[in-house]
């Protein structure tokens, strides 16, 4: 059946212009009242937000399960993540740093106050250093290994390529790299 049969010349020109501008028939015909209904209401969204603020390490799946138990609302973990994103929250890796204790903060402040008036020549005599382990092939996390089922897991020894780096900086800085092979299981 020909779709242009009942179109006036004006309507055909409008449709042709819209198609040339990049509109599809579906996007142009869609009415606002045809949008999909949200699967959560304002109270559900608030529950998800508050649960995430209370426990920063909770996952989307855990929040989905909490919402199902507490409010009897069945949604996907992807919907939970979308609601958290709408609230301005996003998932990130937490920093792996030691917490600063009160004693450590006081000691750092004392160091700063004792050395705040040092000259450039005095600071040039100081050497700051830090040791870092750099994994060349994999992360520090648990490494997956493909292995047959009949093989003894304890017999498998993995060799991980590690490099120890000593970082130093001062007036005359030197970077020392010590490369070694260390077995890990």
Image (cartoon, rainbow, N blue to C red):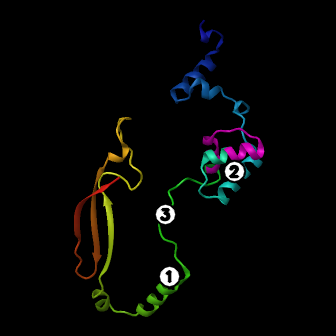
Q: Residue at x 61, y 16 (%)?
A: 9
Q: Residue at x 61, y 58 (%)?
A: 56
Look at the numbered disc 3 and give the secondary structure of its residue: loop
Residue count near mark 1 (Cα–Cα under 10 Å), binned few <14, some 14–19, many ≥20 = few
Vertical placement of 36 versus 79: above or below? above
> Which element carries disc 2, helix, strand or loop?
helix
Whether the residues at callouts 1 and 2 have beta carbons within 8 Å, the answer is no
Label of residue 131 in the image: none
Q: Is the residue 119 above or below the residue 170 in the image? A: below
**Residue at label 2?**
48
Tags 1 and 3 touching, CB below 8 Å: no
Q: Are marks 3 and 2 in contact (CB under 8 Å)?
A: no
* Image-based side of 87 in relation to 156, left or right: right
**Magenta segment main secondary structure:** helix
Task: Give the residue pinned by disc 1.
Answer: 104
Q: CA distance from mark 1 to mark 2?
A: 36 Å
Quarter the N terminus occupies: top right
Please provide the residue range marked out in magenta: 65-84
Disc 3: which residue = 95
Q: Nearer the viewer, residue 113 or 176?
A: 176
Q: Give neighbour class at mark 2: few <14, some 14-19, many 20+ (Cα, 10 Å).
A: many
The residue that appears at 60% across and 41% down in the rendered structure is 78
Q: Residues within 10 Å of mark 3 (few under 14, many from 20)?
A: few
Q: Quadrant of residue 162?
A: bottom left
Left of 102 or right of it: where is 42? right
Q: Is residue 89 magenta?
A: no
């Amino acid at each position: 059946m020909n779709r242009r049969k009942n179109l006036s010349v004006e309507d055909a020109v409008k449709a042709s212009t819209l198609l040339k501008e990049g509109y599809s028939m579906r996007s142009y015909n869609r009415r606002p009242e045809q949008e999909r209904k949200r699967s959560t209401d304002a109270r559900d969204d608030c529950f998800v937000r508050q649960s995430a603020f209370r426990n920063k390490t909770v996952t989307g799946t855990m929040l989905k399960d909490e919402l199902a138990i507490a409010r009897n609302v069945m949604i996907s973990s992807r919907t939970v993540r979308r609601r958290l994103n709408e609230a301005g929250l996003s998932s990130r890796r937490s920093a792996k740093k030691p917490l600063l204790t009160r004693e450590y903060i006081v000691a750092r402040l004392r160091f700063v106050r004792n050395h705040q008036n040092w000259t450039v020549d005095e600071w040039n005599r100081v050497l700051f250093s830090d040791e870092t382990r750099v994994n060349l092939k994999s992360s520090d996390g648990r490494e997956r290994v493909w292995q047959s089922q009949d093989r003894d897991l304890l017999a498998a020894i993995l060799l991980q390529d590690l490099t120890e780096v000593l970082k130093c900086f001062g007036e005359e800085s030197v970077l020392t790299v010590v490369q070694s092979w260390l077995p890990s299981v």
